[in-house]
Image (cartoon, grey):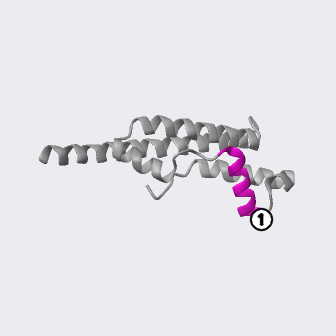
Amino acid sequence: MIKAKRRTNVAAINDAHTRACYIADIQRVSSAAKVDLSVGRINSLEAAEHCYAMRNQLMAKYRNLTSVAGLATAKQIKSTPPSIADLFEQYARRLFSCSYQNLSTEQQQGVHYAVIDASGRSNSTL
């Protein structure tokens, strides 16, 4: 009983550290993309696509380092990431009450920026 409790405590500590590393990494990716955008190395669509891909790679990496219980919790909240097209549509509707395809170029860029910002935020329910 004591060994099981100790293992649970160690797993929780490891999961907390793993989560902190994940959060730091996604924030770093988002910040780097914003810098690249501001100096013109990439456009907003490329930055959004890069952030989306990197966040999914980091999520997979850190889920492999998470305890069985932590992984179950994470998968219950989000088993698979939404597609980037779904994210564009979600933010278009939230920001402009319109389909992404019907937005102006400037509005689409606003959606891209929202995806870039969101890629640097973790799900606070975990």
Report the residue at 63% width, 41% height from top.
51
SS state under label 1: loop
**Relative horizontal placement of residue 45, taking residue 56 as reference (left or right):** right
Report the residue at 51% width, 40% height from top.
59
Give the camera-side residue of 56 and 71: 71
Q: Which region shows up in magenta?
A: 83-97
How many numbered tags mark residues here? 1
Q: Is residue 117 above or below residue 53?
A: below
Across and down, in percent, residue 93 comes to 74, 61
Residue picked out by circle 1: 97
Report the residue at 80% width, 52% height from top.
108
Q: Quadrant of the C terminus?
A: bottom left
Instruction: Decide whether residue 96 is among the magenta residues.
Output: yes
Across and down, in percent, residue 12 comes to 30, 47
- Spot the residue most to the bottom: 97
Give the camera-side residue of 52 and 1: 1
Mark 1 crowdedness (10 Å alpha carbons): few <14, some 14-19, many ≥20: few
**Relative horizontal placement of residue 47, taking residue 108 as reference (left or right):** left
